[in-house]
Amino acid sequence: MKSIKKKQIYQLTVTQFLETIREPEVLFWGMLFPVLISIGLGLAFTQTSESKFQVMVVGKNCTELDSLLNIYAQQNQKNGKNGYTWRINDKTLGNTEFNFIYSDWQSAIVSLKRGEADVIVTDSLEEIHYHFDPHNSQAQLVYMKLSALIKSPASTADKKQTNIVPLTLKGVRYIDFLIPGLISFGIMSSIMWGISYTIIERRSQKLLRRMVATPMKKSNFLIALMFVRIVMNVVEALVLFLFAWLLFGIHIQGNIGALSVLFLAGNLAFTGIATLVSSRTSKTEVGTGWINAVTMPMMILSGIFFSYHNFPEWSIDVIKFLPLTALTDGIRSIFNEGAGWMEILIPSLSLSLFGVICFIIGMRLFKWY
């Protein structure tokens, strides 16, 4: 009996293994796709062991910084952004690159809110001031590195006092950056898993086959799914915002109507993608892979948890075209920058048009079984 049992286990194991390797999609999503994700993260955080920091310099009389840049003139290059790029080579701790961008105060604050800059520096005859969120570890690192360099013997700044000016304005804290990203990420995840996976699972269980006999249009079925997800997304977003408002004092500084339109446009965009992804897939394993292929790259690239300016310069323009990036940047601008109808007009139209196109293509490819 024991030999028979062992033989059954062996045969079942071999059978399951053969069934698995016969599905190239399963091997791709299980083995190759995580490797691709790790490459993406590696580009964001470990690119050539070099740290890049954006420093906004406010005022035309930053004499100490100007003199410091002149001292290291051989290391400085014009960065094309009304400022200088200063590189410090260090084989032990890795190279550091500071991008000094001259700006006015309002533009500097907007850059901080968007995650395009880390620290604002102002300079006077007696003091150097560093303005940043004291709870932002990235900004703290910039301050420590830059202040140490400015106080170095090579500069004349050691006679000056260095003051930290904590920025606690609404919109420049990390939590202000995070909450809009979580709202847009919730929209994407809810629709992709709530619509795509539901359709694929029902198709794999032969439940969609039964609906063919009913007098029901495909469009009605998909629109009903979309309506349910939009309602759920509204509830989830309200709960998240209420939590953030009570605990962190987050406010919506922009137009509520514009936020509602952009919110709806984001739902339309991801409904179209979800319909297209699930239009023909009949295996849940493959469907899960396709959903992850859509959601995970955008979750990493689109600036949900950290600024996408950490990625190489050549990739930023591509990242901005991603649907989740457009949605996140739009919601973040309404929350933190006080954006209104004109600022969200193009993102809303682009997301809506993209969603409609994907929905139409998905409808044409859609099969019940």
Image: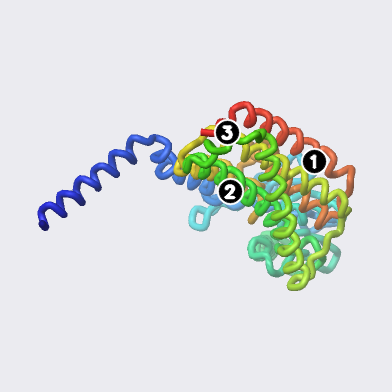
**Considering depth in this image, is 40 or 121 the residue closer to the camera?**
40
Tag count? 3
Q: CA separation, marks 2 and 3?
A: 23 Å
Mark 1 or mark 2: name the one nearer the start of the chain: 2
**Direction from residue 69 to residue 93 in the image, left or right:** left
Secondary structure found at label 2: helix
Residue density around tag 2, few if under 14, some if 14–19, many if 20 or more, within 10 Å: some
Instruction: Check disc 3 and report the residue beneath it.
Output: 212
Please name whichever residue, 348 or 321, is drawn nearer the observer in this view of the structure: 348
Quarter of the image where one finds residue 11: top left
Q: Residue at x 71, y 63 (%)?
A: 240
Where is residue 117 drawn, in percent x and y? 73, 53
Per the image, the residue denoted by label 1 is 348
Secondary element at image label 1: helix
The answer to whether residue 275 is above or below residue 339 is above
Q: CA distance from mark 1 to mark 3?
A: 35 Å
Residue 145: name its quadrant.
Answer: bottom right
Question: Which amino acid type corresponds to the residue marked 1 in the rendered image?
Answer: Ser
Q: Which mark is residue 193?
A: 2
The picture places residue 159, in percent across and down from the top left corner, at 76, 70
| Residue 4 percent location from the top left of the image | 12, 52
Instruction: Report the amino acid beneath label 2.
Output: Trp
Q: Is residue 261 above or below residue 361?
A: below
